[in-house]
Structure formats: structure tokens, C-alpha cells
Image: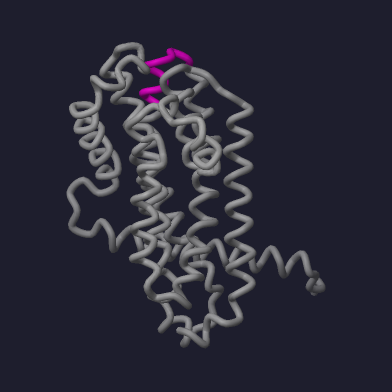
Amino acid sequence: MVAETPLNSLLRGGSRYLELVHILAERALTARYRGSILGVYWSVLSPVMMSAIYTGIFGRAFLSYYDNSYLRYALAVFTGIVVFNFFSGATSQALTAVVHNGGLLNKVKLPMSVFPVAIVVANCFQLVVGTLPLLAVLTLWQTGNPLLPLALLLPLLAVVAVCLGMGLLVSGLYVFFRDLPYFYEIMVAVLSIATPLFYPPEIIPERFGVVLSLNPLGVIIQVVRDIVLRGIVAWDQIAVALTAGGLTLLLGVVVFQTWRSHYMDML
């Protein structure tokens, strides 16, 4: 009989955790798309429709920043909305994950973090199956470089890390502050304006530049746009995006684990 070691225990625990995430993510996807005709492809249709609306309203005003091309402006808006919608959807759904599973947690001993993580993973499936292939096709069409679509994985990895960190943070906060969904809805709306989704970042006044530079989504969206529209892989910006994602994830993990011992008293 092989003696149990700390490493074996860690690997076994990690395997169980991943299995739980897989089961819960699959359950979330099944519940979300039961009876849906388009399923995950709503994640593509919604940004396409919003991009068309923004192009019709603001296209003429910002055309000079996009080589006087309505198409390039529409593609820039589309890439921004895709990234932001992923963040907004994943974190808003993860916010209630722990509290909504409080009954289960009172009956079965489970790692609490598995619930918000599973929600983000479910949204990752939607991103990979619905949106990523289209972004890859657009990149190939705009640049003609068959290797550039692979570079999209780096900024998308950064936004997934941001979502995991924020998902853990807000799901932990919601255990104590039940008004948080209303506040978070306002925060996401403000963030959607503070992030250059439908306007070029060049028009942002310099005095606001420092504050807006703290928004990791702005950097991530710009990296995606550089790859898709210009065929440029800005490694310095990618490093900034990955660092921001890693720091957000670390913050979420630390806060969630610090407060974990108090969660059961509130559920």
C-alpha cells in the first residue's frame, strides 16, 4: 500500500474540485439554454446588433479614427462589446452563486468557491464556442496571418482571470451585503461608459487617462482590437493585461478565503 503524501492529497483534492466545477458548469449551461433555439450563439447575435446600432448613431462622429471605414468602426465596437459582455455576464451571475446555493452548502460539505468559479467556466464555454471562432475568422480576414488568431488567447486569458477574481470577490461580498446586486448593476453601467466600447480611447481627456488606465478591461479590449484590426501583437500591453488579470484573481481569492469562515453563519 502506497503511503499518502501531501502532494497526493493536493492532487486528489484538485481533481475533485475540477470535477465539481465541470458538473456545476454543465448544470448551469443546461438550465440557461433549455428551450433556446440559438443557445450560445446569442453571445454573438447580441453584440452584432448593438454594434450595428452604435455604428448607425456614432459611426460618422468617430469615423476618422478608423481609417474612415464604417466596417472597421463596427468591428472595433463589436470586439469591445464582446469582451465587456463576457465580463458583465460572468461576474453578475457569479455574484449570487454562493448565496443561492446556501441550502446545499448547509447539507453537504463543499468548497464554496466552486459555485462562482463554475459560473465563470460556463460563460467561458459560451465565449469559446460562440465568440472566439468569429473573432479568429475576423482576425484572419483583416490581417491574412493564420498565426494571429492564436494570439487572441492571451487577452482572453486575462479577461477570464479578471472575471474569476471579481466573481469570487462579489460572491463573497453578497453573503454579507444583500443589496449588492443593485449597486453592482450601477457599477457595471458606469464601467460600460468608462470603457471605450463605442468611442476611441484617443478622445479621453488626459486628466482622466490615469483613472481610466486602472480599468483592466480597457487594456484587454485594446489588445484584442490591435490583433483583430491591425494585426499587431503588443507584448507590453499583453503583459499589462495579464498582470491586471492575475492581480484581480489574487485579490478575489485572498478576500474570498479570508471571509470563508464567516459565510456559513450568514447562509
Q: Image height check: is 175 above or below 148?
A: below
Q: Residue at x 60, y 40 (%)?
A: 242
Q: Image height check: is 165 above or below 110?
A: above
Q: Quadrant of the C terminus?
A: bottom left
User: Image check: 38 left or right of 6?
Assistant: left
Residue lying farthest to the front in this orientation: 207
Residue in the foreground of this view, choosing between 237 and 129: 237
Q: Image height check: is 12 above or below 186?
A: below
The picture places residue 126, in percent across and down from the top left corner, at 36, 47
Q: Residue at x 48, y 60 (%)?
A: 167
User: Image check: 33 left or right of 240?
Assistant: left
Q: What segment carries the magenta color?
A: 136-145
Q: Quadrant of residue 33?
A: bottom left
Q: Quadrant of residue 237?
A: top right
Q: Residue at x 19, y 33 (%)?
A: 53
Q: Quadrant of the N terminus?
A: bottom right
Q: Residue at x 63, y 34 (%)?
A: 239
The picture places residue 96, in percent across and down from the top left corner, at 39, 69
The picture places residue 214, in percent across and down from the top left corner, at 55, 43
Q: Is residue 138 magenta?
A: yes
Q: How many numbered callouts?
A: 0
Q: Quadrant of residue 181?
A: bottom left
Provide the major secondary structure of the magenta segment.
Answer: helix
